[in-house]
Amino acid sequence: MPDYTGDQSAMSETAIFPVYKNDKFKPHIDKAKYDEMYAASISHGPKGEEFWLKMAKEHLTFFHPPSKAGRGALEHGDIRFFEDATINTSVNCIDRHHQDSNAIIWERDDGSHENITYAQLLRQVCQLANAMKELGIRKGDVVAVYLPMIPTVAVAMLACARIGAVHTVIFGGFSAEAIKDRVQDGKCKLLITADEGVRGGKIVNIKKIANEAADQCPSLQHILVYKRTGNTVPSHRLDLHWEDIVLEQAAYCSPEVLNAEDPLFLLYTSGSTGKPKGVVHTQAGYMLGAMMTTKYMFDVHNGDVFGCVADVGWITGHSYVVYGPLLNGITTVMFESLPTYPNASRYWKLIQDHGITQFYTSPTAVRVLMRQPEEFLPKSPFEKLRIIGTVGEPINPEAWMWLHEKVGFKRCCIVDTYWQTETGSIVLSPIPGAIATKPGSATLPFFGITPVLLDPVSGTPIDDADQEGALCLYSKWPSMARTLKGAHQRFLRTYLHVYKGYYFTSDGASRDKDGYYWIKGRMDDVLNVSGHRLSTAELESALTSHASCAEAAVIGVHDDITGQAIVAFVCVAHGIDTASQEVAKSLIQTVRGSIGPFASPKHIVLLADLPKTRSGKVLRRVLRKLWSEEELGDISTLADIQVLEGLKGGIAKAKSKS
């Protein structure tokens, strides 16, 4: 049995869970080895060069190996890694692994599943690659992929990589307008989509939405349609059918020889303006980051089954559903459904049925499951589960402990990972076997990452412990984004010139006396109340420690006296009345007790649910606009529009009491 016990209160920065140990699997590195490798990875000159060349040659298969590691400077945005090497990503993900082992386990919405071996995956990828070549798709062309969570999305990504095309995966919950923006910005010639999607027992009209987008996309020449349900759906004049085009192709396609710095994919992410940013990731550097973080952060070994339940439409799905696990030659689980369908035991059944060894989810999903009746929780430890990871936002200590006790049975390592679309792979996280954990802390940096806290006004480094500042990265690393498509100056302004010589994450953080990092949330989510700087993450963590609070989102609103006032939107736990003034008062007292009287929310809005995207991210923009009675604008990413009515009523009640 693994040795992983610690202070059960674990609600402060002093609570440390010792380094994870397992009697079946020896972690790849210990603390001494981590220190040695980390020091080499951030070294300037020959030592750093030697480290990254060694890592690249050890982890990746090249046609022509590199003789150069990292070049360029953050200030100029001309970063490149392994620039004299040639490689192919699909070869690294498929060809070089044992062909009879499982590459993908796909769990359908209805609970049935399908296994796809590496040999089967290679044939499917090659057939699609040949079909795309027949349609005129060549190296450098951008292919849009708008699919539900089915293996075909991974096939499409890898087929693009096979021939040197650039994929841009568009989340299956986006609207036609959002699809149009991305297809047009990428000048995509081909859109790969499906007839329908299935999620939570409901049909998603993928093709209907794709058709609406295609009508506004003059760059499109073809729409390739895969049958997920086989139901009759609206056709489009650009339609080509999978069974007519793809299944008729030869089952092998020679891989394109690509430069290490050729683009691999575009992934669009929201910015401070309305125009989405097309983040560009390249071949070898991105691969090395995805592979190494999967290997070390999740302690993967041969035969492991990696269960990341993110959607492939986001960076987590790119790096830890598709690329990271497949580069390591293990099995990845693709999950089509919801954590609460048909009931709240779905994740736990998924882990048990497939022998998942690493499970990666979001704090939002964890908090949703925490509100469910205990009858749905696992009754005994999972035989094979070793690592539980969270991603997307800082995890509050209560949710961390719930995972540790209720899901991990105090036997698993909990890894709170911090990273972004632009970083490509994890930059802060405990490494099992090497780094002790603290509930709520992303702990220490990964190889090649040099975090620094800067004073937001002066830009000078903050050296003292427990002081909050702007989280920046001082070094270049292989998997970082190289640019924004067609907008390099915007790339520089957004990330590299806010604080010259640093990559600015846009997040605030603090560093404790042990050097551990605590993410405080976006800098624009830091509130200033009567001169006191308060992070929304800190306030939300205090609120969720209350038994009646399942989830919370905090915003700042204008206040004539204090500058900003705190409004807390609280999603109540199962069985709690949203009209209860006693609960609202008790929540305020909890915040006062946890942070101080100055942190008291001026308004508490009790709700049954918060406005979220289909991937579970809370739409704070919607909360701000509803409170300010502004036009909501585009709400195409909102998962459930009916939530808005409850929000409006709750806001009206809160305002009437002020």
Image: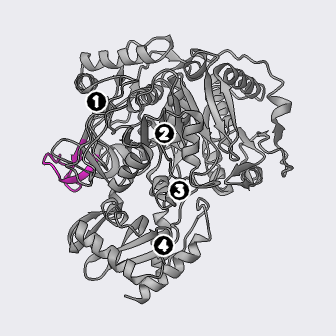
Q: Which mark is residue 625?
A: 4
Asked if the magenta segment contains residue 466, the reply would be yes
Number of numbered discs visible in the structure rendering: 4
- What percent of the width, then of the height, locates residue 406? 42, 49
| Precedes in sequence: disc 4 or disc 2 | 2
The Cα atoms of the two marked residues, 1 and 2, are separated by 19 Å
Q: Is residue 118 magenta?
A: no
For residue 434, the mark is: 1
Does 564 sit above or below residue 129?
A: below
Q: What residue do we see at 33% from left, 61% from top? A: 541
**Camera-side residue: 340 or 153?**
340
Q: Give the mark nearer the N terminus: 4 vs 3.
A: 3
Which range of residues does the magenta coloring cover?
A: 452-471
* On-image quarter of the N terminus: top left
Residue of label 2: 359
Identify the element where label 3 is drawn. Answer: helix
Q: Residues within 10 Å of mark 2 (few under 14, many from 20)?
A: many
